[in-house]
Image (cartoon, helix red, strand yellow):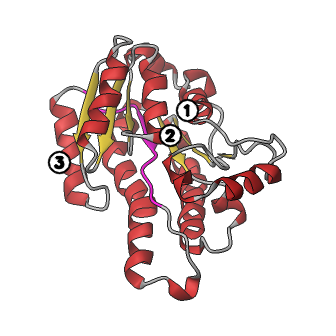
């Protein structure tokens, strides 16, 4: 960690932005940081009530919490979000690019619109959010960028070509940007979970879930809190020598 950054702002006084923080992994990440009283910004696009509920849970720990809506596919909306955070004195020291969408289907059946949308949310959104908040980190010679990827971005998945491609791009983005920003005291890492027990699993019936669990050496799906713990660890000041890594908590499914 850059010594000046540590002296200027203790960890507990830093601000974390979690995109897609209204549910699932994003909500768990927001609540993990809030549990120690950090400043937390919960981004969402349309799930206003869900984001407010996560905010209420976070505030129970004494955290300063702000919810903010933006379409991360839009540079204009991200710039407005940045301006709002600056006005509230909550410019993030830690950016968690968690917002994402998936798509299941044969490549032959994927429309250009679906391809563009999955890429825009998962990959372009990560680029735009990172770019918007990077100048402050560079000026401070300190920062953490943590991208929530997927095991499919490492291994690829049949019938999830577009999603796998987007997450693979996120992994490459992570590795390249880590080299670019290391001299500025900023780390860039990706967390690439296996199957996590979230709303994304609602499309699977019990038999499909059972078959999937049997493929995982740990014999179960991950809980969102387990992914949040890894994200939190990568954000710590003492994790400053870990950068450019794609870490996959997957229960031994992919080694």
User: Regarding mark 1 in the picture, which secondary structure is present there?
Assistant: helix
Residue identifier under label 3: 80
Q: Which residues are magenta?
A: 90-101
Could you give the CA–CA distance between mark 2 and mark 1, rounded to whole angstroms? 7 Å
Q: Tags 2 and 1 in contact by the CB under 8 Å rule?
A: yes
Say which residue appears at 57% left-offset and 83% top-offset: 107
Residue identifier under label 1: 228
Q: Quadrant of the N terminus?
A: top right
| Classed neighbour count for the residue bearing mark 2: other residues with Cα under 10 Å, few (<14), some (14–19), many (≥20) | many
User: Regarding mark 3 in the picture, which secondary structure is present there?
Assistant: helix
Q: Within the image, what quadrant is residue 232 found in?
A: top right
Query: Residue 183: in sight, yes or no?
Result: yes
Q: Position of residue 61 (x, y in %)?
A: 39, 12
Residue identifier under label 2: 25
Q: Nearer the viewer, residue 208 or 109?
A: 208
Q: Tags 1 and 3 in contact by the CB under 8 Å rule?
A: no
Task: Assess whether residue 164 is covered by the magenta stretch.
Answer: no
Mark 2 or mark 1, earlier in chain? 2
Mark 1 or mark 3, earlier in chain? 3
Q: Position of residue 251 (x, y in %)?
A: 77, 42
Could you give the CA–CA distance between mark 2 and mark 3, rounded to whole angstroms? 25 Å
């Amino acid at each position: 960690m850059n010594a000046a950054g540590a002296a200027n702002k203790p960890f507990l006084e830093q601000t974390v932005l979690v995109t897609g923080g209204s549910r699932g992994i994003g909500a768990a990440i927001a609540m993990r940081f809030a549990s120690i009283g950090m400043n937390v910004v919960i981004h969402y696009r349309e799930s206003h009530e869900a984001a407010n509920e996560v905010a209420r849970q976070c505030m129970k720990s004494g955290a300063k919490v702000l919810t903010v809506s933006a379409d991360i596919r839009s540079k204009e909306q991200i710039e407005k979000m940045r301006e709002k955070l600056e006005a509230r004195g909550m410019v993030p020291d830690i950016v968690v690019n968690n917002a994402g969408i998936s798509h299941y289907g044969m490549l032959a059946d994927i429309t250009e619109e679906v391809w563009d949308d999955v890429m825009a949310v998962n990959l372009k959104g990560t680029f735009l959010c990172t770019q918007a908040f990077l100048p402050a980190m560079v000026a401070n010679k300190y920062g953490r960028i943590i991208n929530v990827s997927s095991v499919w971005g490492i291994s690829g998945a049949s019938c999830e070509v577009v999603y796998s491609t987007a997450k693979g791009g996120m992994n490459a983005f992570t590795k390249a940007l880590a080299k670019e920003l290391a001299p500025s005291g900023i780390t860039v890492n990706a967390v690439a979970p296996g199957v996590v027990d979230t709303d994304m699993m609602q499309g699977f019936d019990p038999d499909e879930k059972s078959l999937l669990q049997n493929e995982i050496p740990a014999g179960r799906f991950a809980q969102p809190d387990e992914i949040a713990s890894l994200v939190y660890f990568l954000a710590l000041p003492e994790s400053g020598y870990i950068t450019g890594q794609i870490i996959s908590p997957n229960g031994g499914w992919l080694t």
